[in-house]
Amino acid sequence: MGTLTANTVQSEVLNLHGTQVVAIQQISSVAHQIRQITRDTELHLLARDKADLSTALSPGSWCVAECLEHLTQTTRAFIPAIADAIAEAAKLTSNRPLRTGILADLLIRTLHPPYRMRFNVLPQLVPHRPDPETAWTNFVESQAQLSALVVSAADLAIDKVRIKSPVYARIRYNVYAAFRMLVAHQSRHVWQIEQILKALDSRPASKVA
């Protein structure tokens, strides 16, 4: 993936509307966080073998590869709805902040690590013991797709178009909120990956399956 920076986003927007500074900064922040999550995950996985990435700490818990697969599945579930909404979004015409909404703000706060609240995962988003290498490749590809979608929305009023949640069908929120929730969700599971690997490192070698 190419590096996605604030300058990348700004260069695509400033020649269209020179006044959307606040919104550009918000979109740039989302883009940066997605890129940073990918980098942080890669650092966690460096020098790790397949055993590390395939080992769950307890029956019923996820291994690292399963966390990666779940993140990919979730991102890919959101992308079509977000893309359709972006296609209908109007251009930003004033220097104003993008807003998430009260419900979305609450969901974002509950997702961020370290977390206390756990959620039931929909069957279609439950990982199924993926090959670690495949899980990583698919994760990187989904991050690239999400990054491109963020950049495509840089000059649009994406807080004025809403999607139905692919995860909880009774909930609707705007596209900016959806981006921020995906980032919070990814941060949650990257933190989980870090905790799994720390726990594996602290185990006596004979007990690591």
Image (cartoon, rainbow, N blue to C red):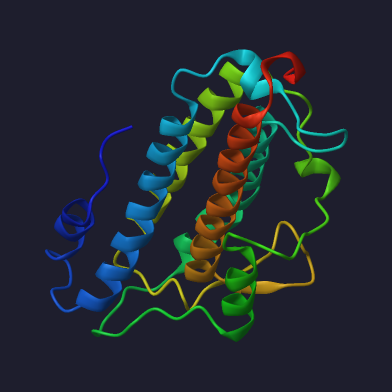
User: Residue 136: x percent and y percent?
Assistant: 54, 26
User: Residue 90: x percent and y percent?
Assistant: 39, 74
**39 relative to 137, above or below:** below
Asked whether, in this view, residue 22 is left or right of residue 150, the answer is left
User: Residue 140: x percent and y percent?
Assistant: 47, 32
Residue lying farthest to the front in this orientation: 204
Asked whether, in this view, residue 94 is left or right of residue 40, the answer is left
**67 relative to 175, above or below:** above
Instruction: State how many labels appear.
Output: 0
Asked whether, in this view, residue 144 is left or right of residue 164, the answer is left
Which residue lies at the image location 55% right of the left edge and 56% below the top edge?
182
In what quadrant of the picture does the C terminus appear? top right
State which quadrant residue 150 falls in: bottom left
Which residue lies at the image location 26% right of the left edge and 69% below the top edge?
25
Which residue lies at the image location 83% right of the left edge and 55% below the top edge?
120
**194 relative to 116, above or below:** above
Residue 84 visible in the current orientation: no
Residue 92 visible in the current orientation: yes
State which quadrant residue 185 falls in: bottom right
User: Residue 86: x percent and y percent?
Assistant: 46, 62
**Which of 5/51 is in front?**
51
In what quadrant of the picture does the N terminus appear? top left
